[in-house]
Amino acid sequence: MPVMTAYAQTQQNHERSHPSNDEKTSFLLGMSVYFGYLMELKPKQDRRIRTHRPNPPSYAVAVDITVDEEPEVDKENGTETWIVDKEPERSLARGHILTMWRDDHVIGSGRISKVDGLSRHWVTFRLAGARDGLRVRVPVPWAGLSGYASHTHTSQYHMLSPIPEPHVLFKDTPPFADPESNPYQFELTCGKEIRLRAKLEASTHREEPMEEPVQN
């Protein structure tokens, strides 16, 4: 092979294996445009607060909670409601044994027996095994609602009272920017939601507890 031809072929092979700076720049720009296109196709992130449905009631789970300095006392109805001030170590659910703390002092304890009140942003639980009328109120994101209670909250959200306002940790966050938009998203399958809707409609004309039967 002539020397010049061999040299030319060697140069071509070198250029293929070592692209020029212009080729590298063109390649990087193309990849940047491609990834930008993929990001546009990605669905927008749902900023609603996800809540989790608890496992069947457990009577062996003890949870410490921090509450406000003073409870809300309703003498007419004989209730004493303590408001949860800080996020507990786990979502509060039926069956949990709560110990209420304020600073270094124990206020009281009891087992969550049922949902006793539901508003847009708060859940009130009644405590059993404690003095009569003792209750705790917890922000919705820190409560583990049953399927029935969570479906009730979702389907009747705009009929629920907006008072009390969201906990201070939530009320100024993006999901709460629109006061008429439901900022919560519960984990319910389509089939489960259909069954719960039927149950809710069937109970329209009769009193129905907001809890499902205990699963043994």
Image (spheres, rainbow, N blue to C red):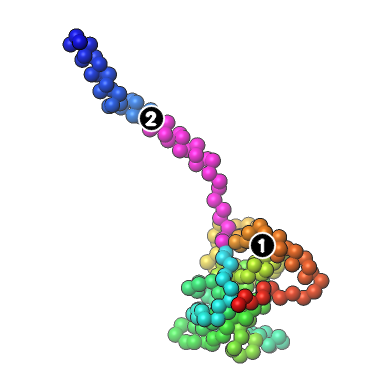
**Residue 45: image x %, image y %?**
54, 51
Whether residue 124 appears in this view of the structure is: no
Mark 1, Cα crowd under 10 Å, few <14 / some 14-19 / many 20+, is few
Secondary structure state at the residue bearing disc 2: helix
Chain part drawn in magenta: 27-50
**Which residue, given by chain and number where applicable, does mark 1 sit on?**
192
- Magenta stretch encompasses residue 34: yes
Hey, which residue is sitting farthest bottom in the picture? 131
Question: Dot 2 corresponds to which residue?
Answer: 27
Q: Is residue 5 left or right of residue 36?
A: left
Q: Residue at x 50, y 39 (%)?
A: 38
Looking at the rendered structure, the kind of residue marked 2 is Phe
Which one is in front, 118 or 61?
61
Residue 151 position, x and y percent, is 67, 65
Q: Position of residue 103 (x, y in %)?
A: 46, 82
Task: Please state the horizontal and vertical placement of residue 37, each as a whole percent of the image.
Answer: 50, 37
70 over 155 or under it: above or below: below
